[in-house]
């Protein structure tokens, strides 16, 4: 019997149709992937299934019964659990408390923390998380927190598990753990709906793939009948052969930024790296090996030791203001809290870093509205930011357009060094391509670019050189013909092997 | 058209003016004596004291801060001015009082920036310290003083408009420029919506915080001086009514208590509205107790109408 049946479901918001007669089904013992660009309607479909939204027309049947008065609470009670990209953990409570949130096992009304921890352990093991259930969830790295979310979903023993971009913050090992969980669930007759922008993952785990484009189902394919290019063609409606821009022949250039022995608290050794105009350097390796900390240190957001030279002169980057003044720009991985003022308008976001030029002289000067509008208009055009108007709030933009704003705001300052953390996380294929080409353009104009990414394909396709990090140190450097996905994955894992030997010795 | 209407509905400062007009009309219709020029003049004059404090409070709330030392600063400024005036004359006294007030704001900001204390705790603590210090300074019996300049400011009028009101409007005009047109104001709004994003965008957090808290305390000091001129006497508790009413004015004026959203002009409507409501309740001969209960309930009712915090989605 079909577990979930979505039949000719339509939904619109304020007159804008986001889903048009969408139909698909999920069988027991099946992994179904929902594929589509940002704004294709994937999240809306999932919200309908989990009871966050109700369809305007059409029906949803769950276990044969049409759902009525559906709500997140009822959906959960009926065995639907979901893990989203946005974390719902309480960072101050322990991992175990989070796993059983809302359903703490109690004895005579008292929750015993030892019980809680003991019950959480097997669940954490299942998701491959080696962490003490008593640590506060907020202390864990982002990827591990995502796994706690998964454990929390499993605690409810779901019949239908929804993974909504749940792997975007995970490294390859952790992704494998998630897939193992999905596989186990499938074997026991459960079902999984997975949404991800990483096409390779989807092709490896799912049994069928349903492609959405502009709120309509383009096709549902069995995995054996399709491949990457076929799916992208369905999603985008055209071929995307030139995903990555061509890399120029690199002749040696004098570096603009030279870093030696950069150490943040907790790292094992210092990081040496050189950034030169025209070059894109990547920081790779397993997730959470200090890549993010290096970027934050170079932007003055993190105390650090070591020597930093700009143009051959030593300098201290003690605060973001200082870093900005010296020509450094930073696009953080967490664009909703650090990259953007999400409740401010696109205009305010784009102008914030340029107020010095829009209102020259002292801080007590009037901001020129005319020059601001010109600047903002130019950035929106250049970056092809799709916003209803410059006055639209940044949170109303799609993820890809938000990322474009977070990047565009640095351009008027003409930074000489641009730091980007996970520049395309959770962004659709089309926008990814645009951002890759833009970064290459900026480099060609003389910018030095440093990128971190958990996506090996991205690092290999985009970067001139990739530094592989392990526990806060650079363990390998790959460039030219050596820079392949295989070598990169190998080096990331080899770093662990090497470090393991060191610690045994 | 629809979009314009939706935008209008979401414009909370405008709502504040709408509610003010409706309340005023209701007062004229259902309670006697609110339609005379004299009563209007009296209302706007009374509202000025609260209004000046509230404009300062707006600057701080917009940064998602709060200043709970304003009541103490109102008293501080008046007491210091009266005390100094006895020895050194009016002009010096006014300048000293304003300088001391601004200093309190700088201390508040310093506590937030360098000690990383939450604004509510820091400003409440400074307020308490000031109240205690004033008690010691005056030995419990503050002086009264007649300073011609302040007397004229508080009681005089030009073309029928009270000078205090003109001062309030002038201050508001400067605040509108500061918060909505200047670079510093942009930084304050940015800081009010997201501190991490502001830091990562190079917003000068210390400078902005210092400037806005100093301005807020300075305005509380100005209000204290005008009150001194109005009553001719200083007291340790003269600022007390303005503490929570200033915050209520800001919120009723449509500014989000969480910061980053709102307009200074809304606060003007908020202060007028609160003053009008108080006057109405007095006109209905309610005693002090029932009046406060009614005012509190009215504030809640109005907040429900248009100033609820949005749920983040």
Image: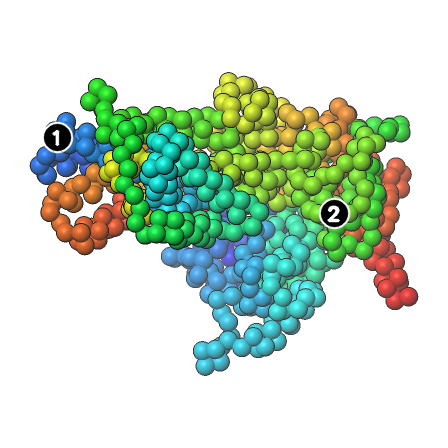
Image coordinates of residue B117 in percent, x first then y, are 52, 51
> Which residue is denoted by mark 2 in the rendering?
A304
| Residue furthest to the left | B32
Residues at marks 1 and 2, common chain?
A: no
Q: Which mark is residue B35?
A: 1
Count of marks overlaid on the render: 2
Determine crowd level at label 2: few under 14, some 14-19, many 20+ residues with C-alpha closer than 10 A. many
On the picture, is B4 further left or further right than A84? left
The chain letter under disc 1 is B
Say whether residue A439 is visible.
Answer: no
Residue A374 percent location from the top left of the image = 55, 19
x and y percentages locating residue A398 in the rendered image: 55, 38
Q: Please report the residue visible at 74 percent of the width from the left and 47 percent of the height from the top.
A: A304
Chain ID at mark 2:
A
Asked where in the image residue A248 lies, by quadrant, the reply is: top right
Quadrant in which residue A185 is drawn:
bottom right
Quadrant containing the C terminus of chain A is bottom right
Callout 1: helix, strand or loop?
loop
Contact? badges 1 and 2 (CB < 8 Å): no
Q: Pick the residue in front: A456 or A502.
A: A502
Front position in the image: A429 or A8: A429
Q: Please, is residue B34 above or below residue A92 in the view?
A: above
Q: Residue at x 45, y 78 (%)?
A: A109
- In the rendered image of this protein, does residue B76 appear above or below residue A104? above
Q: Looking at the picture, does residue A467 appear above or below residue A324?
A: below
Tell me where residue B223 appears, x and y as whole percent.
33, 36
């Amino acid at each position: 019997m079909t577990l979930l049946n979505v039949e000719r479901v339509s939904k619109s918001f304020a007159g804008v149709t986001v889903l048009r007669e969408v139909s698909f089904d999920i069988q027991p013992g099946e992994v179904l992937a929902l594929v589509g660009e940002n704004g294709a309607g994937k999240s809306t479909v999932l919200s309908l299934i989990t009871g966050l939204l109700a369809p305007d027309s059409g029906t949803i049947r769950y276990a044969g019964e049409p759902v009525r008065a559906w709500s997140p609470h009822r959906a959960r009670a009926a065995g639907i659990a979901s893990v989203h990209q946005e974390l719902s953990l309480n960072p101050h409570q322990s991992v175990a408390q989070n796993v059983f949130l809302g359903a703490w096992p109690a004895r005579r009304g008292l929750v015993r923390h030892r019980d809680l921890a003991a019950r959480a352990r097997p669940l954490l093991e299942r998701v491959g998380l080696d962490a003490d259930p008593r640590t506060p969830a907020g202390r864990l790295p982002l990827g591990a927190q995502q796994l706690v979310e998964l454990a929390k979903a499993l605690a409810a023993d779901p019949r239908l598990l929804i993974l909504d971009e749940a792997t975007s913050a995970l490294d390859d090992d952790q992704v494998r753990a998630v897939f193992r969980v999905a596989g186990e669930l499938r074997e026991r007759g459960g079902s999984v709906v997975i949404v991800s922008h990483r096409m390779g993952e989807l092709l490896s785990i799912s049994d069928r793939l349903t492609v959405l484009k502009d709120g309509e189902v383009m096709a549902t394919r069995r995995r054996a009948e399709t491949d990457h290019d076929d799916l992208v063609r369905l999603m985008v409606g055209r071929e995307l052969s030139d995903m990555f821009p061509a890399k120029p022949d690199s002749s040696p250039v004098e570096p603009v930024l030279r870093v030696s022995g950069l150490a943040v608290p907790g790292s094992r050794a210092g990081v040496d790296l050189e950034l030169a105009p025209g070059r894109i350097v990547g920081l790779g390796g397993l997730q959470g090996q200090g890549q993010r900390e290096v970027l934050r240190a170079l932007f003055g957001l993190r105390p650090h030791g070591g020597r930093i030279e700009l143009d051959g002169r030593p300098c201290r980057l003690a605060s973001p203001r200082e870093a900005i003044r010296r020509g450094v720009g930073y696009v953080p991985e967490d664009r909703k809290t650090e990259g953007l003022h999400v409740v401010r308008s696109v205009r305010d976001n784009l102008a914030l870093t340029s107020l010095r030029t829009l209102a020259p002289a002292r801080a007590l000067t009037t901001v020129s509205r005319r020059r601001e509008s010109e600047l903002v208009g130019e950035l929106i055009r250049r970056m092809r930011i799709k916003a209803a108007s410059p006055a639209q709030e940044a949170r109303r933009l799609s993820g890809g357009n938000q990322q474009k704003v977070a990047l565009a705001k640095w351009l008027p300052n003409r930074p000489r060094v641009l730091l980007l953390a996970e520049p395309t996380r959770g962004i659709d294929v089309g926008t990814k391509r645009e951002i890759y080409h833009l970064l290459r353009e900026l480099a060609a104009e003389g910018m030095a670019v440093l990128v971190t990414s958990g996506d090996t394909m991205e690092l290999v396709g985009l970067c001139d050189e990739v530094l592989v990090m392990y526990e806060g140190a650079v363990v390998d450097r790959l460039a030219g013909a050596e820079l392949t996905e295989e070598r990169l994955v190998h080096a990331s894992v080899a770093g662990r092997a090497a470090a393991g030997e060191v610690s045994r010795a | 058209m629809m979009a314009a209407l939706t935008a209008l509905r979401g414009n909370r400062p405008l709502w504040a003016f709408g509610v003010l007009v409706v309340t005023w009309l209701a007062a004229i219709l259902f309670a006697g004596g609110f339609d005379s020029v004299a009563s209007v003049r009296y209302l706007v004059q009374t509202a000025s004291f609260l209004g000046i404090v509230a404009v300062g409070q707006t600057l701080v709330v917009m940064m998602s801060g709060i200043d709970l030392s304003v009541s103490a600063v109102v008293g501080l400024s008046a007491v210091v001015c009266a005390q100094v005036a006895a020895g050194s004359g009016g002009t010096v006294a006014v300048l000293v009082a304003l300088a001391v007030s601004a200093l309190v704001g700088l201390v508040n900001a310093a506590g937030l920036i360098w000690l990383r204390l939450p604004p509510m705790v820091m400003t409440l603590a400074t307020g308490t310290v000031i109240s205690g210090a004033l008690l010691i300074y005056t030995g419990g019996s503050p002086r009264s003083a007649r300073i011609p300049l302040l007397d004229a400011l508080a009681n005089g009028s030009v073309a029928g408009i009270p000078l205090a009101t003109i001062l309030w409007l002038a201050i508001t005009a400067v605040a509108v420029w500061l918060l909505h047109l200047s670079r510093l104001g942009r930084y304050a709004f940015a800081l009010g919506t997201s501190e991490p994003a502001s830091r990562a965008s190079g917003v000068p957090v210390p400078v902005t915080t210092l400037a806005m808290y100093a301005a807020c305390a300075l305005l509380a000091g100005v209000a204290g001086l005008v009150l001194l001129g109005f009553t001719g006497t200083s007291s340790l508790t003269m600022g007390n009514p303005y503490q929570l009413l200033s915050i209520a004015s800001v919120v009723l004026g449509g500014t989000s208590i969480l910061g980053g959203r709102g307009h200074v002009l809304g606060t003007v409507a908020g202060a007028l509205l609160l003053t009008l409501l108080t006057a109405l309740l007095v006109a209905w001969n309610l005693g002090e107790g029932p009046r406060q209960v009614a005012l509190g309930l009215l504030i809640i009712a109005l907040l429900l109408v248009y100033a609820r915090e949005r749920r983040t989605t």
